[in-house]
Image (cartoon, rainbow, N blue to C red):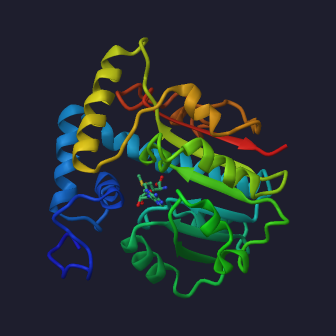
Amino acid sequence: MAGGEPNPPGIDITKPNIARVYDAFLGGKDNFAADRAVVELTLRIAPDAVAGAKANRAFLRRVVRYLAREAGITQFLDIGSGLPSSGNVHEIAHEVNPAARVVYTDNDPVVLMHGQALLADKRTAKVVTADVRRPAEFLEAPEVRDFIDFSQPVALLMFSILHHISDEEDPAGITAKFRDAVVPGSYLAISSFRMPGPEHPEDTAKALAVQKLFNEKLGTGLWREHLEILNWFGEWELLDPGLVPMPEWRPEVQGQAKRNSTYYGYVGGVARKP
Ligand code: SAM
């Protein structure tokens, strides 16, 4: 789309959009000038924001590999999945177990369009349009229930979506509904923007400035307190090393992570339903 291809029908390309701005951060091709303008403005405030987006994708890949290989999970719900990127959930899971089942869900119609093209010949992965703010609609949809066996453990993946949900929209209530819908032995993985805190005043100032920019341009984007994010895991058992800057979550290579301005402001964790 970036190369002057026709606009997808029904899409306003003059307005930046979360999925496409994120795609632009990752160097993808499914974005337009208005999306890239938000990236440029962000990089003026936080020049290492691209590294933050890449750390999120790397965290996703390590988590899915862990869940498929070590935890033996065979069913994945990728909620707020975004546009196809490098190392999509089904690609990682299928490296371990070709029979693993993945449902991608997002409320963006462009994600559906690209996902359907990517998954056209797949019987083990599908994409469904749904809004995370209405968990029941998604969890009870026949196209999901015919595909996922809810009597068996499921991995709920909520990477970089809950910081796009406002306090009024109740992210704690949303996560609770998803947690209640799955059996013991299921997992919940979350990544989220986090306020770096008083120990990191420069990073906090940058987080506040990018938060302001995102809300002006996209209408969302919240850097929350650590305890608010922890609360989304409910009573589930948080795996080691806990809710941490993503490069610290079970890195494949030790001691490589750079403490840049996105390091303390972007965290991830995984928990298991006891
Ligand atoms: N999960 C992917 C990742 O971490 O690489 C993509 C993250 S992207 C920053 C956030 C995604 O959440 C976007 O694709 C956006 O369309 C989606 N999203 C935002 N609000 C949503 C909602 N209310 N329901 C479903 N998806 C939503």
Residue at 28% in and 51% down: 218
| 82 relative to 149 in the view: left or right | left
Residue 30 quadrant: bottom left
Quarter containing the N terminus: bottom left
| 118 relative to 1 in the view: left or right | right
Horizontal and vertical percent position of residue 61: 57, 53
Horizontal and vertical percent position of residue 178: 68, 54
Which residue is at the far front? 168
The quadrant where ligand 1 appears is bottom left
Quarter containing the C terminus: top right
| 264 relative to 206 in the view: left or right | right
Residue 136 quadrant: bottom right
34 vs 221: above or below: below
Residue 186 shows up from this direction = yes
Horizontal and vertical percent position of residue 112: 44, 75
Residue at 73% in and 68% down: 97
Residue 96 shows up from this direction = no
Residue at 60% in and 41% down: 172
Horizontal and vertical percent position of residue 66: 70, 50
Give whichever of 101, 217 is nearer the camera: 217
Which residue is at the far bottom? 121
76 vs 176: above or below: below
| 62 relative to 8 in the view: left or right | right
Residue at 31% in and 36% down: 211
Q: How many marks?
A: 0
